[in-house]
Image (spheres, grey):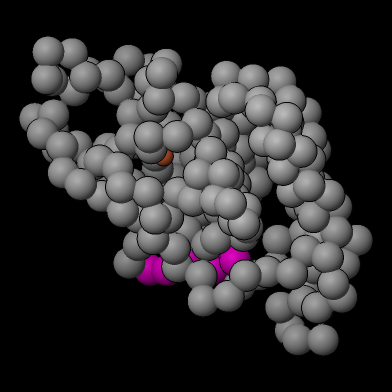
Amino acid sequence: MNAAAAGTPPTGRRRFGSFLELVGRAVDEGVDGAGMPGAIGPAFRTVLAEDDWLQPEFARPDPDRYQQYLLYCDARRRFSIVSFVWGPGQSTPVHDHGVWGMVGVLRGSEISENFELRDGALVKTSEDALTPGQIISFTPERGDIHRVRNAYADRTSVSIHIYGGDIGSIERSVFGADGVCKPFISGYASSRLPNFWGAA
Ligand code: FE
């Protein structure tokens, strides 16, 4: 057993593996982004409440930039799950997604500032401050432009993001303050995938 696996009981990781199967079944059944919070939200909250499954290498901050570790991608790329690790004060640019998404906090706190494009200008419409166990969701149809940041200036926060596609390879947009958008592909920081079913 390696050092990373030693810190995470297999039972917790297998429980997260069961959650992945639940999300896959919802996608198989044709649940859309608007229906996902009802279909998988309660189980997602349980996953966030039981913080014993994320292997330390997928919760490691980087001093220069927030990290996006791919935890799972459906073989048909219909959904992916990513751990976001925020060093103190780190934030994303304003961006969209092009697919549905759900975001929940595992550790610390994260703030999502939500925007709309009105007559070509970026307008902030609301803000969500999330603490462990809290979830937000979005769809392109209802608006999916936001900027996310660590609520803390002095510690790491970790959140779990679920997307209706292989988010790291999707061509989407980042927005400047003037509303001008630029193409953006986020990629992933992971060099390997975690194992949620086996012993290591
Ligand atoms: Fe986002």
Residue extending furthest right?
Answer: 11
Extent of the magenta region = 58-63
Q: Report the quarter where the C terminus lies.
A: bottom right
**Residue 54 found in image quarter:** bottom right
Instruction: Tell me where residue 45 sits by quadrant.
Output: top right
Q: Quadrant of ligand 1?
A: top left
Q: Give how far across and how far down residue 15 sits, in percent.
A: 85, 52
Relative height, residue 134 to residue 54 (above, below): above
Residue 190 magenta-highlighted: no
Instruction: Give whichever of 40, 48 is nearer the camera.
Output: 40
Residue at horizontal 74%, vertical 25%? 39
Q: Main secondary structure of the magenta part?
A: loop
Does 179 sit above or below residue 49?
above
* Percent of width and height locating residue 107: 63, 48
Q: Residue at x 45, y 49 (%)?
A: 167
**Residue 24 in the image, given as x and y percentages of width and height:** 72, 43
User: Residue 118, located in which quarter of the rendered image?
Assistant: top left
Using the image, determine if residue 22 lies above or below residue 66.
Answer: above
Is 135 on the left-hand or right-hand side of 165?
right
Q: Residue at image x 60%, y 66%?
A: 58
Residue 130 seen: no
Q: Tell me, yes or no, if residue 43 can be seen here.
A: yes
